[in-house]
Image: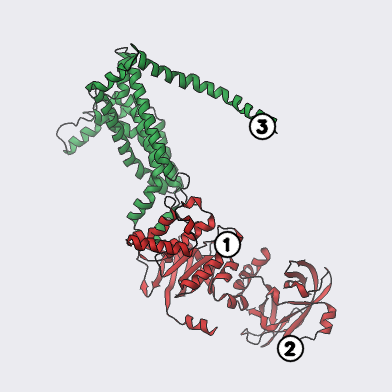
Amino acid sequence: MFMISSRKKWNNVTLLFPIILFLFLFFIIPLASLLLRSLTEPTFGLQNFEQLLATSTYVQVLFNTFLVATLVTVISLLIGFPLAWCITLMPKGWGRFLISIILLSMWTSLLARTYSWLVLLQSSGIINKTLMAIGIINQPLEMVHNLTGVIIGMSYIMVPFIVLPLQACMSAIDPMVLQAASICGASARTVFFRIFLPLCKPGLFSGALMVFVMSLGYYVTPALLGGVRDMMLPEFIVQQIQNFLNWGMASASAVLLILITLVLFYLYLKVQTDSPVSSNTGA
Amino acid sequence: MSLQTNTMTQSPLVCLRELNKEYGNFTAVDHINLDIRKGEFLTFLGSSGSGKSTTLSMIAGFETPTSGEILLNDASLINIPSHKRGIGMVFQHYSLFPHMSVRDNIGFPLDIRKVAKDERDKKVDEILQLVQLEAFADRRPSMLSGGQKQRVAIARALVYEPEILLMDEPLGALDKKLREDLQDELRLLHKRLGITIVYVTHDQDEAMRLSERIAIFKEGEIVGLGTGKDLYRKPPNAFVASFLGNSNFLKINVTGAASAQLDKHHIILDDLHVMPINQQALLMIRPENLQILTPEQAKNEALINGFNQISGTVNESVFLGESLTCSITIPSGEQLISKNIATEQPDLEPGSTVFIRWNSKHSSLYSKWEQSDINKNSAQ
């Protein structure tokens, strides 16, 4: 008996070996070398981090990154929540149809979608022309090559990442629980805020976290729709490497980004244990 | 019995008047009329799709009737949303709030009603004691067993003292033993609190065990209404007879005020029947009202006045511990099932001839029936 179980255990470890090797080669070593570079180039020490946090332009970049990520998260939550609710309430066929539309937009090339926004938002674009034709504005709004453009474009891209987890979470809520609250005397408003919203919490949190973290590190859309003045952290990293060959500074920024993400993830896990992930149905 | 008739004369708490619900071409509830009396335990009994749950949903306010009226204390409920009806409800799958503790689940209706904190806590504690869940007050519903969850649901529905408690197959998801325990608890609870309970179930034993009155639903209509005893002993129609308990049906020809022809036998009927003479009718006898006698016993025991006797051949007899069921073919080719207390019953070998006796007072007679009504039980 002992022989068999110990042998089994040993076998299990050998089976894990390939994946451990893979993780080590492709994730742990690169991350470690990134950290190493940030601490050693050009000389050993924390000078890269000091410079990053002390210079006002760099702080501005960090601030921009957080501002955009926060706004994009909030906006896509505001759009995604009703959308997810709509899909959940729709008859089955229609709900699936709506989801496929959302998935289709997700699967379309990122560049194509970003350039479409460029076309739509530019000063001679459809939106500005229509608004001017109606007479709401006299001169074109500046909606591109600034943070507005970045936020609009990125919110569009991030909405599916809110809708998908949120919709899964909502469809797991037993509608009878809402009826039960209603018969207990709760008005529609109270049912929404006291029962429905708390039950959506897991979906909201996981969607929001995903969008926020993705937004922190997004490059293509900010690069195309953003301006030179309001740079975000990923663009800053690219600039450090391509223009200045400043590997140390770029690595330090990347490490900072990873640290922020890890802290957020830790906070998410802290909050999430408290919320009823597995007991949505009430059964 | 006289005590019961007294309570029956009280004015109804809820009245359903010509209540109708249609989904497209399908009529779920077909113009039903029903008075629910204050303080009674009334059960809607029927198979799935019979309209019993839809009727309950309309009382709760989750479904809007196509036409008809629902009155609570003589005031119409039709345009009142469910959260203002002041009705308590317990659902089949408990429907507890998964993100709240047991205490908060039960306190929820009181919080909505803005009950002061002290009073709220006091009431919640009282009701927790009533359903014997004090020890579980701070747990989440996911950490409770099915029976405990349902007790929380009952507590949540009772805590704000609604005038009427609706229960939609509340014990359906529980196993048999637990179900029986909770049935007893529920019956005691009803006695203690005197609250009006409308209970939906498809389980006839449960209906019998719990209710004061039973309304039997079939295809959106109420086809039988009365105490379990009355419905069982004198079913108003063949459907109720076959739905509630087991029954034997025999086709007979009515020949007089108290006589009929069964195949070639002359039999006597309860003289209270109102069937037209010379017409085919359906005779119903409960299996436990059939006495089975061996030829010797039949010779020794004289036939009592008012009893019928026919002969038959035993197909099979099954010993079930407390009772013995026996399937017998009578000369007309029809099969009868008898069920008797096993202690006194002699062993009946398949193929042996026996005599069947029954008291004419223990049979019911129907002039109209559908084949589907009486086939139901043989299919089970």
Q: Is residue A220 above or below residue A128?
A: above
User: Percent position (x, y) of residue B301?
Assistant: 81, 84
Q: Residue at x 41, y 66 (%)?
A: B87
Answer left or right for A32 relative to B288. left
Helix, strand or loop for disc 3: helix
Quarter holding residue A133: top left
* Residue designated by label 1: B179
Q: Which mark is residue A5?
A: 3
**Chain with colour red in the figure:** B
User: Do the residues at discs 3 and 2 belong to one chain?
Assistant: no
Q: Amino acid at mark 3?
A: Ser
User: Do the residues at discs 3 and 1 belong to one chain?
Assistant: no
Quarter holding residue B252: bottom right
Q: Which mark is residue B305?
A: 2
Q: Residue at x 47, y 20 (%)?
A: A26
User: Percent position (x, y) of residue B67?
Assistant: 41, 68
Query: Disc 1 sits on a residue from what chain?
Result: B
> How far is mark 3 from mark 1, CA to CA?
43 Å
